[in-house]
Amino acid sequence: MLKEFKEFAMKGNVMDLAIGVVIGAAFGRIVDSLVGDLIMPIFGAIGGLDFSNYFVGLNSAVTSPVLADAKKQGAVFAYGSFITVAINFIIIAVALFLVVKLINRVRRAEKAAEPSKPAAKPDDVVLLGEIRDLLKQRPV
């Protein structure tokens, strides 16, 4: 069983997936920093928006205007955090879309640069051609 697991774990696809997960996690942290440290402060400076403190207290004990303190006081509906995460997702989705678009463009360019091969004829067409040629060789 250990040998089978080792063969499975060392296959190229599993290793590629593991590397992709690690890189994806690092990319997620970069996007979190981009949104939290660069994009949201710009929104805050322009329109006074700070999504991180948008919440609704779910009981009367929540009186703090700061989310971290409000969570200590009781249950809160922190929709501002959701808005920030949604913006993170949109940025990641756009970035991945651009990467996939770039990869597809490179593949199309490589495919166009390759010499085109004539399309292979179906087997039945080849067989009928061989029968025709044999009949032509046969004396009447």
Image (spheres, rainbow, N blue to C red):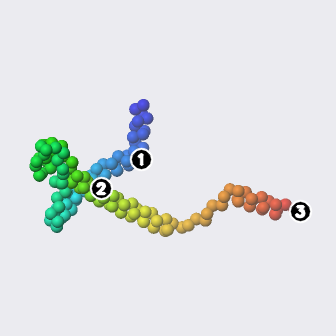
Quarter holding the N terminus?
A: top left
Which of 110 and 51 lies nearest the eye of the viewer? 51
Q: Mark 1 points at which residue?
A: 13
When the figure is inspected, residue 117 is found, relative to residue 83, above or below; the finding is below
- Judge left or right: residue 13 versus residue 59: right
Q: Residue 33, percent across and down?
A: 21, 56
Cα–Cα span, label 3 and label 1: 61 Å
- Label 3: element kind: loop
Nearer to us of marks 3 and 2 is 2
Q: Residue at left 54%, top 67%?
A: 115
Disc 3, disc 1: CB below 8 Å?
A: no
Quarter holding the C terminus?
A: bottom right
Kind of residue at badge 3? Val
Disc 2, disc 1: CB below 8 Å?
A: no
Q: Residue 105, percent across and down?
A: 42, 66
- Judge left or right: residue 53 versus residue 12: left
Could you say which disc has been placed on residue 140 in the image?
A: 3
Could you say which disc has been placed on residue 5 in the image?
A: none
When the figure is inspected, residue 52 is found, relative to residue 118, above or below; the finding is above
Q: Residue 64, percent across and down?
A: 10, 49
Which of 10 and 93 lies nearest the eye of the viewer? 93
Cα–Cα span, label 2 and label 1: 26 Å
Does the rendering let one see residue 99?
A: no
Characterize the local packing of mark 3: few (<14), some (14-19) or many (20 or more) Cα atoms within 10 angstroms. few
